[in-house]
Amino acid sequence: MNLLESVSREDKPAFVCLPENALYMRLKEGERIAGLDLHDECFRDLAKVADAKNLIIHVGSVPLVWQGKLANSSVMIRPGGSIQASYQKIHLFDIALEGQKPMRESDVFAHGSEPAVVGVNDWNVGQTICYDLRFSELFSRYAQDGVDLIVVPAAFLQKTGEAHWHVLLRARAIESQCYIVAAAQAGAHVSPAGTRHTYGHSLVIDPWGQIVAEASGDKPECMILTLDKSGIAKVRQQIPMRNHRRLSKTNA
C-alpha cells in the first residue's frame, strides 16, 4: 500500500501493475493457505486508493477462493469500487531445481483454464502470471487477438531469474509485437516459516524487444512510464507477422 499511496495525482498514472503474490507469499512448502475472497478488506482498501487517485489497479496475483477452489488469481480494481477476478494462472510452478527442495504450486492451487483479455482505457491487455512466461503458446493466443500489452506479474526465484528472466520477456515482446509489463517481487522475504529470495528486475519492454525501464533486484520500487501505442503499429507494419501466421489458434 505504501508504494501506491506515494503516487500523487500530479503523476496521473492510469494503470498500476503489482507483482505476483502481491498480498501474500507462501514461504514454506506445504503450508496451508486459507485464501482470500473478493469481499476481503484488503481489496476494499485498494479500491479506496483506486477511487481517490483514479487508477485501475492490476493486483498481479493473490490466493483467491474462486468457483469453490483456490486459484492463483489476478484481480482488477477500478475507480467506482469494481473488484473483479480477471485471470487464473494456467501453468502452475511444479519444479525441482538441482540442489533445492521441490516446489509444487499445484499442491495448493487449481489450474486456470483460459487466457483473459481486459480493457484498460483504449488498450487491450492480455494477462499471464509468472511461470506462464515459459509457455509461448499462451502469448501466441494473445498475439493473434492483437493485444496491445501483456502483463507478467512474477515472483521469479533468484536462480531462474538470473538465467531466464530477461531473455524470455524480450522474446515474448518480440514474438507478440506488443508491450510487456512485468512487475516482479524483489529481494529477501523473511518470516518465521522461512526465507525466499526473488530476482526482482521488474521490466517494461517495447514491441521491438527493447528494455524501456528496469527496476532494482533487491528493493521495492515504483516506476512511472508513458507508453505510446504508435510504437506497436510501427513494428507490426515493418514485420507483419499476423499476416504471415500459418498455425490456427489452439488451447494454451
Image: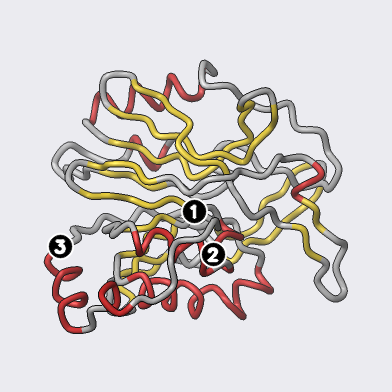
> Residue 144: percent from the left, percent from the top?
35, 62
Q: Quadrant of the N terminus?
A: top left
Residue at 38% x, 57% y: name it. 150
Q: Nearer the viewer, mark 1 or mark 3?
A: 1
Residue linked to disc 3: 228
Give how far apart the Cα atoms at labels 1 and 3 are: 21 Å
Q: Is residue 135 above or below residue 105?
A: below
Report the front residue among 219 and 24.
Answer: 24
Tag of residue 128: 1
Q: Is residue 60 above or below residue 71?
A: below
> Residue 230: percent from the left, percent from the top?
12, 66
Furthest residue to the bottom? 238
Report the front residue among 159 and 65.
Answer: 65
For mark 2, give the secondary structure: helix
Give how far apart the Cα atoms at labels 3 and 2 are: 23 Å
Residue at 50% x, 50% y: name it. 19
Residue linked to disc 2: 133
Report the front residue among 72 and 30.
Answer: 72
- Asked if disc 2 and disc 1 are in contact, CB closer than 8 Å, the reply is yes
* Residue 112 in the figure: left or right of residue 173: right
For mark 1, give the secondary structure: loop
Give how far apart the Cα atoms at labels 2 and 1 are: 7 Å
Residue at 48% x, 49% y: name it. 115
* Residue 252 in the figure: left or right of residue 120: right
Of the image marks 1 and 3, the number of the one nearer the N terminus: 1
* Residue 113 in the figure: left or right of residue 87: right
Q: Is residue 225 above or below residue 207?
A: above
